[in-house]
Amino acid sequence: MNILVGIFVLNLQPIEKKSKMKILVCISKSPDTTSKIAFTDNNTKFDENGVQYIVNPYDEWYALVRALELKETIGGNVTIVTVGNAADEAIIRKALAIGADEAVRIDADPTDAYYTAMQIADYAKSNGFDLVLTGKETINYNGSQVGGMIAEAMDLPFVSLATKLDAAGTTLTLEREIVGGVQVVEVQTPAVISCAKGMAEQRIPNMRGIMAARTKPLQVIAPVAVETLTTYTTYTMPNAKSACKLIDPSNMDELVELLHNEAKVI
Amino acid sequence: MSTLVYINSNNGLNKAALEVVTYSKNLGGNVTVIATGSSNQELLATLGQYGASKVIFEASVTADDAQQLTELIATVAQAENAATIVFSHDVVAKAIAPRLSVKLKAGLVSGAIEAPNADGSIKVNVFSGKAFGSVKVTSDKKIISLLPNSIQPSISGSNCSVEAFNGTLTTSKIKVISTKKPEGAIPLPEAELVVSAGRGLKGPENWGMVEDLAAALGAATACSRPVADIGWRPHHEHVGQTGVAIRPNLYIAAGISGAIQHLAGVNGSKVIVVINTDAEAPFFKAADYGIIGDAFEVLPKLTAAVKKFKAENH
Ligand SMILES: Cc1cc2nc3c(=O)[nH]c(=O)nc-3n(C[C@H](O)[C@H](O)[C@H](O)COP(=O)(O)OP(=O)(O)OC[C@H]3O[C@@H](n4cnc5c(N)ncnc54)[C@H](O)[C@@H]3O)c2cc1C
Ligand SMILES: Nc1ncnc2c1ncn2[C@@H]1O[C@H](COP(=O)(O)O)[C@@H](O)[C@H]1O
């Protein structure tokens, strides 16, 4: 019986939907948004003590969930890729629990954006994806760099800060932020897209997803030799604010006077 | 040493354009500007006053296709032998600067907030504004993307020469279907004054008070995340760690509790005014001026006081 079912499935393969999409979603980790930010080693390293890592919200809520929605409507496959160490497998499993099919971890420290992007581009080039999705930015370094760098390294079109993404055949229709407005654009696959708020709604993984994630394939590959172009030398914390000056709610003339003469901002 | 500055002059010369030219002038060396959007040579020549020695314009290229614009800037950078390329850290720069970084193998510093230090490192916001980092570029060429409102434009010279780009361009692979731009609104990231409100305002019908104060000040409006999530305000007004990061001179927050994720996007503001009924609201710890009171009473009073001040001083 089992064998018969197997053959039946195999026979169905050739009539799959044409527009099936192979999607790569770039996932990074970031400290939980409530984490206390501190530095060690003479202010040269982020203090990871007690820090809980999460999937970078843009990568999870928007890029990954939209990739899954596309797969559910037109068929296809969603692979996630992370440049990171073994410890990052916890966030990789979380992304698998939300619904990605398989994961790749490029076994290296994501030292700078260039290094990270070159690793991902190298993997993506040799695996033929229709769509590469990144988050708008990581919320720790806020560089908004990796997506555009992957696109250039792969010589592909790049649509940044997309807030909507639809696919029909090889045509992608996107809405994106532009300076002070929004724009609807079309581009052909393959393409690289960075995903911002609006693209999808957050999905909470269910028990079945969490169980399934444990056995989904997670491939670890070695990095390629690439140099870095930037380094962080030191970190500093903002100066503590001096005590807040309280103003009587009925005396707004005083506030305006202080904003003008003391703070000199109006 | 020579610096190339990219500006988009679609809507004339905004403050951000003057900031990046001033910033580049302060780096020392020769400053060339590559401008797309406008062919208004008289206008472009005024960039000389801020430190440009030459402006090259290409009016047929828009900012729509990052690949095409990257080609253009790379071509000019090579012709001008530019060691440093400077952008204003807006949505265009977020698409172009990373591509250019790979194309020219030039290290990219995103969201710079200061001129380079003596050792060449540049200060940027990290952890969504909860801390600063100093980034050093180790490649020969570098790209700096300057956060709007980080420095003041300053006049140091006179008009400069303007010439058209002379070269071939690749075709755009991005087809624009439609463009929507809000009329007259001040783009939030560039705004010097911002009036913002949160869930304490109870409903979208109460935003008139916020808009009145913003109009009296000439400020942009912003909001907390839940307010955008429930649809009281448009998404592009949402500030914070997962929204827009801003650094205005003045940030007025009414009915916002001051959660850490909200503060992350606004604590680069020079002066913060908080209006909240709850004296224990965490936002007061980050405020310069605090008003413990009902936004429904305080906002109209503040608007009236601002109007009175403006009438007396102008
Ligand atoms: C991963 C993650 C990312 C997030 N990113 C962001 C982000 O980018 N930006 C953001 O804003 N939030 C963000 N949040 C949400 C954040 O944690 C808070 O929930 C949110 O900022 C609260 O919004 P609020 O202050 O408007 O509402 P509330 O917390 O409900 O506060 C309302 C405030 O209004 C006051 N108030 C009530 N009535 C009045 C009145 N009549 N007059 C004056 N004051 C009054 C109350 O005392 C209270 O302090 C994020 C959360 C997470 C988990
Ligand atoms: N180490 C990483 N591994 C995989 N993807 C990453 C990594 N770092 C960044 N990215 C992706 O690139 C996007 C932009 O990151 P950044 O340029 O650091 O702001 C993120 O939202 C991720 O989608």
Image: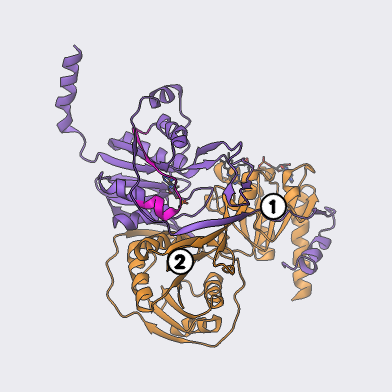
Chain colours: A purple, B orange
Part of the protein shown in magenta: A100-118
Foreground mark, 1 or 2, reads: 2
Q: Amino acid at mark 1?
A: Ala
Q: Quick one: label 2, few (<14), some, or many (20+) residues within 10 Å?
A: many
Relative to A203, is B176 above or below?
below
Residue annotated with mark 1: B253
Quarter of the picture containing the C terminus of chain A is: bottom right
Check disc 1 and report its element: helix, strand or loop: strand
In percent of width and height, residue A242 lies at: 78, 55
Residue A261: image quadrant is: bottom right
Read off the residue under disc 2.
B143
Left/right placement of residue B47 relative to residue A155 reads right
Q: Is residue A250 magenta?
A: no
Which residue does the image show at 35% across and 56% down from the upper left? A158
Q: Chain of mark 1?
A: B
Residues at marks 1 and 2, CA–CA distance in whole angstroms? 34 Å
Residue in the image at 45% along x and 53% along y:
A112
Question: What is the x, y in percent for residue B206?
Answer: 67, 48
Drawn side of residue B155 relative to residue A213, left or right: right
Where is residue A81 drawn, in percent x and y? 37, 41
**Residue B90, visible in the rendered structure:** no
Instruction: Look at the picture and state if B47 lies above or below A117.
Output: below
- Is A113 included in the stretch rendered in magenta? yes
Frontmost residue, B161 versus A211: A211
Label 2 amino acid? Answer: Ile
Of mark 1 and mark 2, the one earlier in the sequence is 2
> Do the CB atoms of the residues marked 1 and 2 lie less than 8 Å apart?
no
Q: Relative to the observer, which residue lies in front, A52 or A206?
A: A52
